[in-house]
Amino acid sequence: MVGAADATDVLILGGGLAGLTLALELRQRMPGLRVTVVERRMHPVREGAFKVGESTVEIGAHYFSQVLGLREHLDAEQVRKFGFRFFFSEGSEAIDRCTELGVSQLLPTSSWQIDRGRFENFLGERARALGVDFRDASVVRGIDIDAVGGHLATIEHDGATRSIRARWVVDASGRAGLLKRKLGLARDNAHHINAAWWRVEGRVDPNDWSQDPQWLQRCDPPDRWRSTNHMCGPGYWFWLIPLASGAHSLGIVCDAGMHPLETINSHDKAMAWLREHQPQVARTLESPGHALLDFGFLRDFSYDCKQVFSANRWALTGEAGVFLDPFYSPGSDFIAIGNGYICDLVEKEFAGRSIDSYVTLYERLFRSFYDNTLTLYQDQYRLFGDAQVMPVKIIWDYTFYWSLLAPLYYAGRLTDIGMLGRLGPQFERAATLNTAMQALLRDWGERNTGALVRHGAMLDQYRIEWFRELNRALGDRLDDAAFQARIIDNVVRMQWLAAEILARARRTHSDIDDRGLEALLVGDERHRSLGAAWYADEDAAAEADAA
């Protein structure tokens, strides 16, 4: 029997990371707003082995720490991240003899490794403290979308069924995609990638894999374990992420055509796969102190969505809408961006303003962010084992991110229509540059007969002064003129970097197609953006050939 309908202003279907952070942001921006969150899991949830998606990068980290004001929790209860770190270690028994890409010191802008169970428990408590009606252990049994009379959801809790009528409804139900399924919004994105993941007890520390004092002292502090460590090989990467609860998160992500899911879709198979591709990791996991906590896998985990915002007062956020790829940990970034747009739409609509044009604009902007980010991953997994091309690609991809989308978010200008209009040509130029660069990198990698081997070299991102400055400058507070000038300068930097990368690719393969980059570039190889250390092996080989 269905009881009388409750009423709320915003009903959020799903009380995970996306739904609870949206509830917090809505209540902070509009304290009088009635917000109801329905979550099928009972709280508190398990720590250590709850959900994957533990690594944050700059936009998501800023959203949690500054926009939502959760910095105290992150510093006290989560792990400060030591940046991304990449080892080109396919088949290696000696990590200290592999090319390493990462930072030797902490970058200025903070990010964290997040134990999702601990964080979502905290978010649930904070939401209730702010007046959110958070109903855990509740299941959505039906949802009717009615733009005129208000949306109606049927909720079951403890065997009883009740209705909730809401002016707005937001799907934050993750891969269940309640509204996506109901409205037929699912869309393939042609990025066919599989994953398997598990958590183990205890810390997995790459420093334990070497006795070389010089290698161990490269980082200050010597805490490689706090990085999101990527062990890379052709068609795949393997993650190691520490959790504050004392567990370690592990995962294999691979191109479906190169490493079929059937080779990794059980713990036994995944361990056999590791023994072949990352034997040093496998030996560690088979040693005492690393008991298995859980195991999961997904086929074709990357997907698109036809629409995420509607003038009929519904929206999708988090994995209920789109999901890209975990390689650069963009999941919380897109939660932050999507939630920001949803809050702005709700705020405007409750103020009596028409939101039709804003829905159209925000949908287009969100789509452009998604499409541009997808290019970083799509058809690029074959490069992942190439220790010559892939480090350059990673620097390029970071530069693209820190030059445009990240500063736009940090400056709180995602809804600044005037500024977005003025910067339109810069964003278009940068997107065109990036599309051409991704094609060039792919061609470069396909022409290489094997990955360049730098025996034990570290490519230190921290020592690239302009790269470190891009990261630091995210926190700058600039007026309109200075912000516009900053973005223009950033795009010029991208042009210089693109010119250098094209020159290096041609040095390796003189007949490589520039993919249209020549018409977009400034500068030449004499202006090195990365520094001589990046090219030491190539330059030494060239000098030897000349002699």
Image: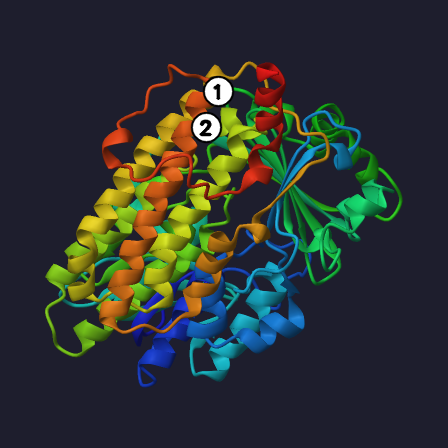
Quadrant where the C terminus sits is top right
The residue that label 2 is drawn on is 504
Asked if 259 appears above or below 332 in the picture, the reply is above
Q: Nearer the viewer, residue 166 or 459?
A: 459
Mark 1 nearby-residue class (10 Å; few <14, some 14–19, many ≥20)? few
Q: Is residue 446 visible?
A: yes
Secondary structure of the residue carrying numbered label 1:
helix
Find residue 212 and name its label.
none
Which percent across, then down, holds residue 45?
A: 62, 63
Number of callouts? 2
Quadrant that contains the N terminus: bottom left
Q: CA distance from mark 1 to mark 2?
A: 7 Å
Which residue matches tag 1?
Answer: 508
Is label 1 in contact with label 2 (beta carbons under 8 Å)? yes
Which residue is located at x 42 percent, y 56 percent? 333
Q: Is residue 388 above or below residue 138?
A: above
Q: Amino acid at mark 2?
A: Arg
The image shows residue 244 at horizontal and vertical percentages of 70, 62
